[in-house]
Image (cartoon, rainbow, N blue to C red):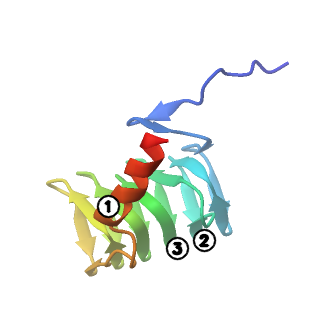
Amino acid sequence: MFKQQSKPSSRDGQAVDTLIGAQVTFRGDIEFSGGLYVEGRIIGSVTATPGGRAVLMLAESGVIEGEVHAPVVMIDGRLEGDVHATDRVELAAKARVQGNVHYRVVEMHAGAQVTGRLVHMESPAGDNVLDAMPALAAANAA
């Protein structure tokens, strides 16, 4: 009945596991893993499953009204609420954020707007690449 794809589709080089289409309004909280691409509207919080890899991509036509918690957050639409990105936030030219943006690394394109604060988060202790180098060298030698 449905043809299984050999690989997930992607947007901007990121795998998309879940798509919320342009004609969809979702009311409620969402917990996700993998890639979530939003072209529609979400009224509620969007949270990545702890411990997993997750990317939230908000398209130019997309709207989120609620808090966002994810490792990587890419915004090109409208977000009303705080953003908590444990890894990286990318604000594209059409991004409109009303809320505070908590980030470890931020990329902000010309034209992006933030009505709130940009709050840099420090890396947790032991999350330093230099600390991991001896372990990587030992793993590669084995």
**Which residue is depicted at the point 43% across and 73% down?**
84
Q: CA distance from mark 3 to mark 1?
A: 33 Å
Give yes or no for contact between labels 2 and 3 (Cβ–Cβ under 8 Å): yes
**Which residue is depicted at the point 35% across and 76% down?**
102
- Work out whether 115 lies above or below 142: below
| Few, some or many residues within 10 Å of mark 1 (<14, 14–19, 20+) | few
Which quadrant of the view contains residue 85? bottom left
The residue pinned by badge 1 equals 129
- Residue 51 is situated, as x and y percent measured from the top left of the image, at 60, 64
- Work out whether 40 lies above or below 7: below
Mark identifier at residue 117: none
Say which amino acid is labelled 1. Val
The one nearer the camera, 135 or 126, is: 135
| Few, some or many residues within 10 Å of mark 3 (<14, 14–19, 20+) | some
Q: CA distance from mark 2 to mark 3?
A: 5 Å
- Classify residue 112 as left or right of residue 72: left
The residue pinned by badge 3 equals 66
The earlier-in-sequence mark between 2 and 3 is 2
- Badge 2 marks a residue whose secondary structure is loop
The residue pinned by badge 2 equals 44
